[in-house]
Image (cartoon, grey):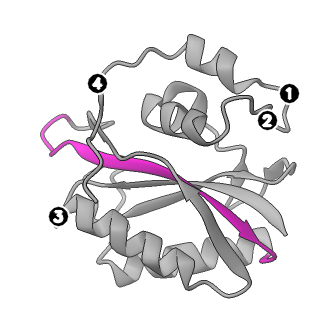
């Protein structure tokens, strides 16, 4: 088993429900187990500003799936939730699931770069990740606490627990 951290986000079609349904789908993945999930956060959108705010979270998943097999499974979950990939990056979406970290691996595949290539500049990734693993050292040598110090809590709001 390897610990994988996943970033989840949605800003269309009832984002809170999209994330909850995605977490249920992750729990049903073969040879995998969701270990913990951060709080949900509301965040400003990247890219075009004329779109709704996002709801984001980070999940810790233990899995024996290979990285590209997991990526395929995550993209299938996105499609099942109405995700349509368009040429426009950072546009509105029903569901986005990104592999942030995959154990101690550093991957630079055509379809997958791990650690996630831009996580250092995304408060909606770093702050939820810090809830789950505050002392985390990334496999490429970066330290999560140092990344957070350089990435202010701007445009981000921790949502109240809704359970």
Q: Which residue is mark 1?
A: 141
Q: Identify the disc placed on residue 155.
A: 4
Question: What is the CA distance from the residue labelled 3 to the residue labelled 1?
Answer: 37 Å
| Range drawn in magenta | 49-65
The quadrant in which the N terminus is found is bottom right
Q: Is residue 6 left or right of residue 9?
A: right
Q: Position of residue 61 (x, y in %)?
A: 66, 64
**Label 2 packing within 10 angstroms: few (<14), some (14-19), many (20+):** some
Is residue 75 in view? Answer: yes
Mark 2 in CB contact with mark 3 (< 8 angstroms): no
Mark 2 in CB contact with mark 1 (< 8 angstroms): yes
Q: Position of residue 95 (x, y in %)?
A: 35, 64
Question: Residue 45 appears in which quarter of the rendering?
Answer: top left
Question: What is the CA distance from the residue labelled 2 to the residue labelled 1?
Answer: 5 Å
Mark positioned earlier in the residue sequence (2 or 4) = 2
Q: Is residue 61 left or right of residue 15?
A: right
In this rendering, is residue 77 above or below 53? Answer: below
Q: Is residue 89 left or right of residue 17?
A: right
Q: Is residue 56 magenta?
A: yes
Q: Residue at x 80, y 31 (%)?
A: 137
Q: Which residue is mark 2?
A: 138
Q: Which residue is mark 3?
A: 14
Question: What is the CA distance from the residue labelled 2 to the residue labelled 4?
Answer: 25 Å
Mark 1 in CB contact with mark 4 (< 8 angstroms): no
In this rendering, is residue 109 above or below 73? Answer: above
Mark positioned earlier in the residue sequence (3 or 4) = 3
Q: Position of residue 34 (x, y in %)?
A: 61, 68
């Amino acid at each position: 088993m390897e610990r994988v951290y996943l970033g989840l986000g949605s800003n269309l079609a009832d984002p809170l429900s999209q994330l909850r349904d995605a977490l249920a789908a992750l729990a049903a993945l073969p040879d995998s187990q969701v270990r913990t999930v951060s709080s949900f956060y509301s965040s400003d959108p990247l890219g075009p500003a004329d779109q709704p705010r996002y709801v984001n979270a980070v999940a810790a998943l233990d899995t024996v799936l290979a990285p590209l097999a997991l990526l395929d499974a995550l993209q299938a979950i996105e499609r099942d939730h109405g995700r349509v990939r368009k040429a426009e990056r950072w546009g509105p979406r029903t569901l986005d699931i990104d592999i942030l970290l995959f154990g101690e691996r550093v991957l630079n595949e055509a379809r997958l770069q791990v650690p996630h290539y831009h996580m250092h500049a995304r408060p909606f990734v770093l702050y939820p990740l810090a809830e789950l693993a505050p002392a985390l050292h990334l496999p490429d040598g970066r330290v999560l606490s140092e990344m957070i110090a350089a990435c202010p809590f701007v445009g981000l709001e921790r949502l109240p627990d809704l359970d």
